[in-house]
Image (cartoon, coloured by chain):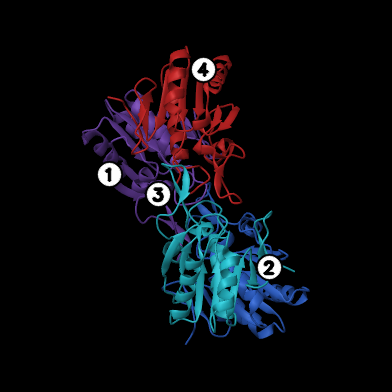
Chain colours: A red, B purple, C cyan, D blue
Amino acid sequence: MITGGTIDKEYDPFRGELTFSKSHLSNMLNQVRCKVRFILEEIMLKDSLEMRGEDREEILKKCMNCSENNVIVTHGTDTMVETAGFLGKNVKGKTVVLVGAMIPYAFGASDALFNLGCAFSAVQTLPPGVYITMNGNILLWDNVRKNKESGEFEEIV
Amino acid sequence: MITGGTIDKEYDPFRGELTFSKSHLSNMLNQVRCKVRFILEEIMLKDSLEMRGEDREEILKKCMNCSENNVIVTHGTDTMVETAGFLGKNVKGKTVVLVGAMIPYAFGASDALFNLGCAFSAVQTLPPGVYITMNGNILLWDNVRKNKESGEFEEIV
Amino acid sequence: MITGGTIDKEYDPFRGELTFSKSHLSNMLNQVRCKVRFILEEIMLKDSLEMRGEDREEILKKCMNCSENNVIVTHGTDTMVETAGFLGKNVKGKTVVLVGAMIPYAFGASDALFNLGCAFSAVQTLPPGVYITMNGNILLWDNVRKNKESGEFEEIV
Amino acid sequence: MITGGTIDKEYDPFRGELTFSKSHLSNMLNQVRCKVRFILEEIMLKDSLEMRGEDREEILKKCMNCSENNVIVTHGTDTMVETAGFLGKNVKGKTVVLVGAMIPYAFGASDALFNLGCAFSAVQTLPPGVYITMNGNILLWDNVRKNKESGEFEEIV
């Protein structure tokens, strides 16, 4: 499920800013010749700083109401931990993996494809629960924080 | 462990051919801000069509003699299944994941980073055994083949 | 001479904004195997919206005081026409070409290298005067405007 | 006019070789927002080592028979000097610029866009004659060679 975040941002040459136009997930999975069956669903395209309670409710509802048991949620990194926490307390019986990027897929030297690969394996191998896959790590929703200085996701303890 | 393959090939502008100069794995893991602890070891830089029995013996020895229990082996795709088979029969008590790319990391639109991400999660989550992570799939060494027409890795059955 | 502009901007993953850290001109000319003799001089690294009269005075001084007769000035596109106008009225006996980019060199699908190539040929072939090379065009300082809607540089008439 | 060469080559992941599928010139000029009026004509897609006398005859004919006076010819670097020599002796009254790349446009770190930019300015500013624009240089057909060791184009004297 696609919710936006840096992974899907683009550079707008007219305003000199980062912006959303459309999701790149379909292109990404095409580029890497992904042959695992998946369904792409775009719920929203938001900077995660602008996500509100109702957005997280909607993500939760989509996770619970879909027929799949393995769900990847692309998400901005700024509030990924918060959304993971909300899903972690409410998702039952499904494996949900949140993933994003520090640098947009559309730019040079992005971490997007690596992170997405981490999410694809994680969602296929992990038991039900809510996880974040960033920086090569697989982190449980109730034991993860974003280090403000390094920008990296790490265990709390 | 690095053995070469397309993932590490470069374009040689003087001869107009693909060639090896050095491994890109260090750059790749740097680019994606990987924070999982790892040790890079370059065993060889070979096109997998040129791999012989002694090369596979060496890969096996390195896998068994290192102190880590989780090992990723980068490898050319042409004989990846063969090496996985040899390791699968001989590796005991370790999780070994073979991974490579259809398009070199150094070129545009490569599958290298995604595949590497798949390998990183898989090696951390799977029980001891020998696996291939390509095309988003996680495949056991004794149930995998490379489809000659599509170039994709798939289950035998 | 390097003054900044989009061509040299980078993405700052911590703040999610575009920023300057160092000029990429040296890398760019290395990448393209440029063998024309040149001297790189970084005067400033500014968004051209923040350029003031004293900045343009400094660019003019550097152009007139250097020993070369052929000068390329990298510059942001927002006020490139204004700087070209100021230089056009004051530069004597030298060929000065202003150039920039709509999309940073460091991002995917940038126009930076093409524009720089246009500037390199133009500065070697044109008679003394002040020019802008953008969008494949070569435009004289007193007959150029940036089209606000398309973002493209064009003749006034 | 498009004749092939490294600039238009792609990587074929199935055979692990470089190959032609279609020209990238249209994409390139789109990417850089080129606004100079041009007509793209694909004459052939050949490695320049495979060019024969009849190919050069055809390029000459196309150059002379088209209604434009400014012609860019994309060409492989291996025999670019030879084709430039043939055109130089036979083209009358037109400005023809040959250009190519050491690294394909489709790969990372290519010189293609820079070289193409050099050609665009050169063809607009130079008097009738036949030229090569490579490595930032503008070289006359009768005073150019490809340095076998460096791969760079340079004046004979």
Query: Disc 3 or disc 4, which is closer to the eye?
Result: 4
Residue C137 point in image, percent of width and height: 65, 68
Chain for disc number 4: A
Query: Disc 1 or disc 4, which is closer to the eye?
Result: 4
> Which residue is disc 3 drawn over?
B8
> Which residue is disc 2 drawn over?
D1
> Which residue is disc 4 drawn over?
A69
Chain-order first, disc 1 or disc 3: 3
Residue with the most extreme top position: A92
Residue at horizontal 32 percent and vertical 37 percent from the top: B35
Chain for disc number 2: D
Q: CA distance from mark 2 to mark 1?
A: 48 Å
Q: Is residue A128 above or below residue C7?
A: above
Q: CA distance from mark 1 to mark 4?
A: 37 Å
**Which residue is at the front of the view, C57 or D144?**
C57
> Which residue is disc 1 drawn over?
B41
**Which residue is at the front of the view, B8 or D139?**
D139
Chain for disc number 3: B
Q: Amino acid at mark 3?
A: Asp
Tell me the SS state at disc 2. loop
